[in-house]
Image (cartoon, helix red, strand yellow):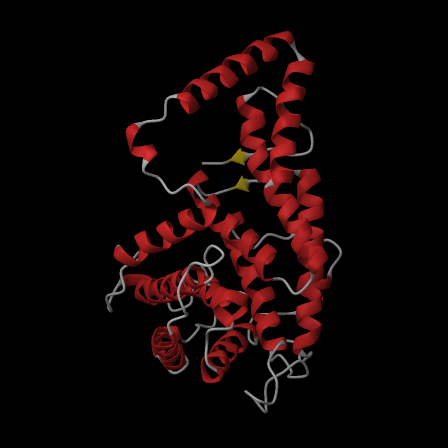
Amino acid sequence: MARLGRVLLCAVAAAAAIAPTTAAATAAVTAAAAAAAATPPAAAAAAPLTLRARQLAALQYHIDRPWPSTKAGQPGGVSTWGEANLALARLAHDRLGAGGSPGGGHAPNATLAAEISAQVVGWETDPRFTPWANYTVNGPLGGLGALPVLCRLALLPLTRAALSVPALSALERIAFNWLSPRSNASWAGQANSWLLQDGSENLDATHKANLYLCAVIANRSDARRHAALGPDTLVALDGRPVRAHAAAWEGHWGRYFAHRAVEGIGAELGSPTYAKYSLQAFANVRDLSGSAALAARAGDFLTLWFVRPLASILLVFSSCCFIVYFY
């Protein structure tokens, strides 16, 4: 957050330096922001003040109003997405609350953790969570729905520590079943892999983040959970071990962030609203990567992504990034 604040200040300073007209616009924006901060709306007065409180409030809002619907029979495997979202929200809310401010919070709810662990175990054999042999979004684990959420359940330390060994085993098997017919380490390892886009940007980012994180999940499996699944397990599509796929996709994402930061970001071919799926993929790579260097690069890329709209508002146009929409 401090880095982002410094970048925003640099953007404002750059606006003032580039053109006198931009300096005037910057002053107007700054004055308007200061006035808004001085007289917050009544509703804002009741808003949580700390980041932890805001996180808990957002999670509770989702628990009270689950989205997507968790009702079975929804089109496109939506109910699996809803179930995974709700399970993640309930578990994260409990664990964040237990780790609240010093001296506060509550003890983790072991009953809740056991309930969600049993639910996750059931997903391994649930036909609705069985991945199809292609990337269609109109089916179980189509890519945009449940799978990124399952990756967070499996890899985020907050939730991973709360799940039982059988639940982690189920998530590892689901991840490998998704990875095995889809991943080719040679494709991921190409120097120009960042240039090769599978469909619209958000679909490409989601599919390839899923492949990377499923490889990371399967790579972390050991004999305590799966005698036949681990780093040396062979992937069906190319016959190479899981560890090779984890390394290849890690390399792909490092190149993707480095090159796209220079060549252009946000080139969504479908609709500007679909960028939320790309952002989910980028955030998952940042939060769940096994590589500290890749996580840091993903964080820098996300900072650049969010600074770019501000630069547009301040009439600062940088050659390092652009946003293009085709309709």
- The answer to whether residue 229 shows anywhere in this view is yes
Please, is residue 123 above or below residue 99 in the view?
A: below
Quarter of the rendering containing residue 267 = top right
- For image coordinates 67% across by 21% down, the residue present is 14
Q: Position of residue 15 (x, y in %)?
A: 63, 18
Q: Nearer the viewer, residue 141 or 225?
A: 225
Task: Tell me the quarter of the image containing the C terminus.
Answer: top left
Q: Nearer the viewer, residue 42 or 326?
A: 42
Quarter of the rendering containing residue 291 = bottom right
- For image coordinates 59% across by 85% down, the residue present is 229
> In this view, which residue lies farthest toward the bottom?
227
Task: Tell me the quarter of the image containing the N terminus.
Answer: top right
Please, is residue 237 above or below residue 95 in the view?
A: below
Please, is residue 99 above or below residue 18 in the view?
A: below
Q: Nearer the viewer, residue 101 or 218?
A: 101
Please, is residue 239 above or below residue 26 in the view?
A: below
Quarter of the rendering containing residue 87 = bottom left
Q: Position of residue 198 (x, y in %)?
A: 56, 55
- For image coordinates 60% across by 65% down, the residue present is 212
- The answer to whether residue 265 shows anywhere in this view is no
Q: Position of residue 204 (x, y in %)?
A: 55, 54
Q: Nearer the viewer, residue 80 or 303?
A: 303
- For image coordinates 54% across by 77% down, the residue present is 176
Q: Is residue 146 left or right of residue 284?
A: left
Number of numbered discs on residues: 0
> In this view, which residue lies farthest toward the right?
191
Q: Position of residue 311 (x, y in %)?
A: 58, 26
> In this view, which residue lies farthest toward the front?
103
